[in-house]
Image (tube, helix red, strand yellow):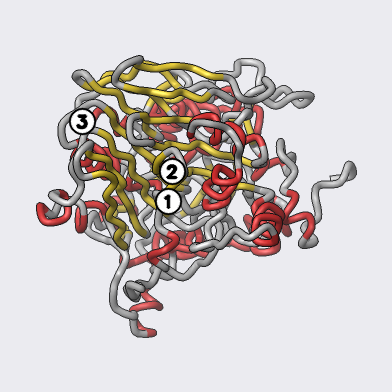
Amino acid sequence: MEEAPRFYAHPFDDDKLKEECGIFGVIGVTDASNFVALGLHALQHRGQEAGGIVCHDPELGFNSARRFGYVRDNFTSADIMETLPGPLAIGHVRYSTAGSKAAVIRDVQPFFGEFSMGGAAIAHNGNITNALALRKELIERGSIFQSSSDSECIIHLMARSLQKDIPDRMEDALRRVEGAFSVVAMTRTKLIGVRDPLGVRPLVIGKVADGWVLSSETCALDIIGAEFVREVEPGEMVVISAAKGVESRRPFRPQPSKFCIFEHVYFSRPDSIIGGQSVYETRRRIGVELAREAPVDADLVCPVPDSGTPAAIGYSQESGIPYAMGIIRNQYMGRTFIEPTEQIRNMGVRLKLNVNRALIKGKRVILVDDSVVRGTTSRKIKEMILDAGAAEVHFRIASPPTAWPCFYGVDTPQREKLLAATMSEDEMREHLNVDSLRFISLDGLYRAAGEPEGRNNACPQYCDACFSGEYPVEPSDMVAKGFQLKTAAE
């Protein structure tokens, strides 16, 4: 087994929700793997731990490559890309949200299975909330698992299906699965995309030359010059072949859509389009709503780079307070492959961010950030701003308080480690020791995301479980482990 590299998250990395995964597939172009590598590069923000590509060539059959680290460090190598020929390929970038947290090559997707009617590979973005129960059942029936990933359950369910072709077997398998999933899969001749019935995780269709593309986000279509066609709809399966183009199926009972609202706040790249809306524009509108809901007298509006930038621009535009780059991000900061000394660890967030002292000194500063999770980074940033001579520090947060863990493909700390799970907004302000702290309301977030009347509390238009504690799919594995769902009193 290939040994995992030793790489260490920086001390401030645990104070952000970790991106889920990115998936990408191409059919009908020469050297499809090269397109997939470019697409994965554009989706790198969704997972930086590892990446993989599986391809098929009519003469050479299936081939694959899986590597730790960034796409640019692996899938730009001519030696690797020459081993991935053919007109059909899929890929995956990973941040582990289920299974082992240790980096193990066998957990890196796409996963491949050989069936009686031929091989198939699958890449999954999301989380299967009944994976432990499924895994136990499958192992008792003789399945042998190679990885700790929940996604491998889908391959084993497909293997046990009695359906005659792979798309039908995939339908069979996914009907047993609960939770959130966007899937890109391939056979020898077909590219397949599926979204779960609630459409929690994103998936879009693109057209490039004579071929077709499936991608987590539209920004990855742009990098290969593909035209955005449409989103795969919640509960839809698309089967794409050179002969028939895009065929649509409906394997699941229709349900109201529950797209992840945090895609708008943080996960998706600002140059992507979601539900016909610019992610950048949604984030700018969040800032506008924040300025209306939580005004404050100040001299400067400064983003916490980079995810707070569009909201800070919106806050500045609405409030009339000048926008300024009070914090500068080190663009070359990545994960380190050496174990930091204690002295380096204590530098913490300063490795990544630095205060523009000449601008900040003597000013009343509004800091706009996308979220507060544990609060450790917010405290360090506040201290840096005060050390630089700021007169006042006011935090404005472009999401409601994150008080509940996500079980749908986002790596969230345990509930007791979430600041908002144990503290009120006033208690958080005292804990962070800032002059004021305000979060956007859920209604304000919904208005910014294109719902003029705000949140429909009877049937929310998005999945907002990390804020509300209302899980659209019960996380049955976690409940079996003792996780307490929200009570009526809460």
What percent of the width, then of the height, locates residue 432? 58, 61
What percent of the width, then of the height, locates residue 197? 62, 28
| Residue of label 1 | 111
| Residue placed furthest toward the left | 78
Q: Is residue 74 left or right of residue 187?
A: left
SS assignment at label 2: strand
Q: Is residue 111 left or right of residue 237?
A: left
Position above or below: 264 against 9:
above
Q: Amino acid at mark 3?
A: Ile
Q: Is residue 383 left or right of residue 425?
A: left
In the picture, the quarter occupied by the C terminus is top right
| Residue placed furthest toward the right | 489
- Of labels 1 and 3, earlier in sequence is 1
Query: Label 2 neighbourhood size at 10 Å, few (<14), some (14-19), many (20+)?
Result: many
| Tag 1–tag 2 contact (CB < 8 Å) | yes
- Name the residue located 55 percent from the left edge and 35 percent from the top edge: 169
| Residue of label 2 | 122
- Name the residue located 30 percent from the left edge and 48 percent from the top edge: 53
Q: CA distance from mark 1 to mark 3?
A: 24 Å
SS assignment at label 1: strand
Q: Amino acid at mark 1?
A: Phe
| Residue of label 3 | 224
